[in-house]
Amino acid sequence: MLHAFDLPGRVRLLCLAGIAALATPGEAQVQRNFPATALRGALVVVDPPAVMLNGEPARLAPGARIRDANNLQQLSGSLVGAKLLVHYTIDGLGLIQDVWILTPQEAARKPWPTNARDASAWTFDPIAQTWSKP
């Protein structure tokens, strides 16, 4: 027999089960939208804020944001030594401001510019998140 005091506990249990079902890792990932200023590169965090970008020394900007493949923010210190394929933006001082660690699907989108010269010559479709060469 169901007593009145059992109902709130059962409702809470059903609500938690529903939330857990919605948060399963098998869900399709939402497409991330990268800005037209995002370039592709190989990043290795050496000793934050020092990094290697495409084999050249570079620095992370103060307050730089690094997002992993799940779009969660990561601390640069937790990525020391990892070789990462990324999209990144550069601030007005030439420092790396935003970094997105790419998923395999994002990495497969080609072509993607690796330098500002190509980005200024190519055409970016922000809806499809694709670049096309002239």
Image (cartoon, rainbow, N blue to C red):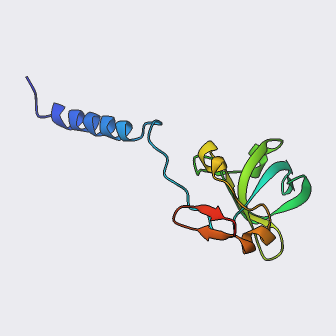
Q: In percent of the image, x 79 and y 77: which residue is there?
A: 92
Give how far across and how far down residue 12 sits, in percent: 27, 38
Q: Residue furthest left?
A: 1
For the image, the number of numbered tags is 0
Q: Residue furthest top?
A: 1
Give how far across and how far down residue 1 sits, in percent: 7, 22
Task: Please indicate whether residue 52 sits to the left or right of residue 29 in the image.
Answer: right
Q: Quadrant of the C terminus?
A: bottom right
Work out whether 115 lies above or below 47: below
For the residue pair 70 and 112, the one nearer the viewer reads as 112
Work out whether 11 lies above or below 75: above
For the residue pair 47 and 116, the one nearer the viewer reads as 116
Give how far across and how far down residue 114 sits, in percent: 78, 60
Task: Please indicate whether residue 36 sits to the left or right of residue 47 in the image.
Answer: left
Q: Is residue 36 visible?
A: no
Work out whether 61 lies above or below 1: below
For the residue pair 110 and 115, the one nearer the viewer reads as 110
Residue 63: name its quadrant: bottom right
Q: Residue furthest front?
A: 134
Residue 89: name its quadrant: bottom right
Q: In percent of the image, x 28 and y 40: which residue is there?
A: 15
Q: Is residue 11 visible?
A: yes
Q: In percent of the image, x 76 and y 51: which residue is there?
A: 76
Give how far across and how far down residue 58 sits, in percent: 88, 60
For the residue pair 129 and 64, the one nearer the viewer reads as 129
